[in-house]
Image: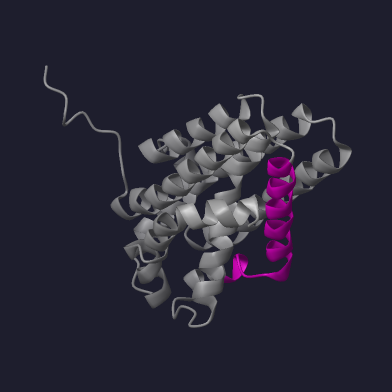
Amino acid sequence: MLFTEKIRKRAAPIWAQSMRHPFIKELQKGTLAEDKFRFYLIQDYFYLQAFAEIHRTAADSTEDLEIKKLFLQNIAGIERSEISVRETFFAELSITEEEIRQTDMAPNTYHYISHLYRAAYSGSVGQMVSALLPCYWLYQEIGDALIAEGSPHSLYQRWIETYESEGYKLTVEAQKNLTNQLAEAASEEEQQLMEETFVISSYEELYFWEMSYQKEEWSNKYVSL
C-alpha cells in the first residue's frame, strides 16, 4: 500500500464528513446563503496567502532541485488562482479590498494557518508536504463528486469547476507522488509525523466548512471575569 493510500484510509471518516457537510451539500443544491459563501471566500483568501508562503518556505528548505521546482510551480498556480478568484468571485459579490482589510481572520482560519506554519518550521519537508496535501486532494475529490450533478447556482457551479480541471488533477497527482517519495525515504518515526500532520490538516479542512457555515467569530462568551 502506498503511503498516500494509507493516510487517506485513516482520514476517510473525516473526509466523508466534509463531503456531506451542509456547506458543501447546500452549495451543490444552490441553496447556500451567499453571505456564507462570501465569508468563506474572504477567509480562504487569508488562508491562501499563508499557503503560498509555506510553499516558499518548503522551496527554500530543500536542496532537491526537482522538489524546489515543483513548489515554485505551485506558488505560481496559487497566485494565478488568487487573481482569478478576485476577478470573478470577488468582483461578482462586490468584495472590496477595504472589506478584506476590515475583516478579522476567523478562529479556525488562524488555527489552520498556525498548524501549517508549525509543520513548515519542523525542519521536515515531508511534514510540510503532508500538511499541505489535504487542501489539494480533498478539493479535487469534492470537485469530482459535485461535477456530475453540478449546481443550479452559476457562481457555485464555477467554484466546483475550478477544482475539476485536468490541470488541477495533475497538480494533485504531483503532490501525492512527492508525498510518497518523501515517505519512502523517511524513517518510521518521520512517517508517523507525516501521517499526523495529514490527519490534522484533514480535520482543519472539515472545520473550515463549519467555520464558514457558522460565520465563526472570536468570542468571549465562555470567559467569566
Q: Is residue 170 magenta?
A: yes
Q: Please determine whether, in this image, residue 12 is positioned above or below residue 51.
A: below
- Which residue sits at x=37%, y=60%? 17
Q: Quadrant of the N terminus?
A: bottom right
Q: Nearer the viewer, residue 47 or 18?
A: 18
Task: Residue 51: name its quadrant.
Answer: top right
Looking at the image, the residue that sits furthest to the right is 65
Q: Position of residue 162 (x, y in %)?
A: 61, 66
Q: Residue at x 61, y 24 (%)?
A: 121
Q: Looking at the image, can residue 97 be seen?
A: no
- Find residue 208 and report its horizontal and vertical position in percent: 41, 49
Q: Is residue 183 visible?
A: yes
**Which residue shows up at 58% across the image and 64% down it?**
140
Q: Is residue 154 left or right of residue 73?
A: left
Count of all numbered marks drawn on residues in the image:
0
Quadrant in which the C terminus is drawn: top left
Q: How is the rendered protein coloured?
A: one colour
Quarter of the image for residue 116 reads top right
Q: Where is residue 107 drawn, in percent x and y?
A: 36, 36
Q: Nearer the viewer, residue 26 or 134?
A: 134
Residue 82 % position (x, y): 63, 50
Asked if the stretch drawn in magenta spans residue 191, the answer is: no
Residue appearing at x 59%, y 71% in the figure:
161
Residue lying farthest to the top in this orientation: 225
Q: Magenta region, mostly helix, strand or loop? A: helix
The boundaries of the magenta stretch are 161-184
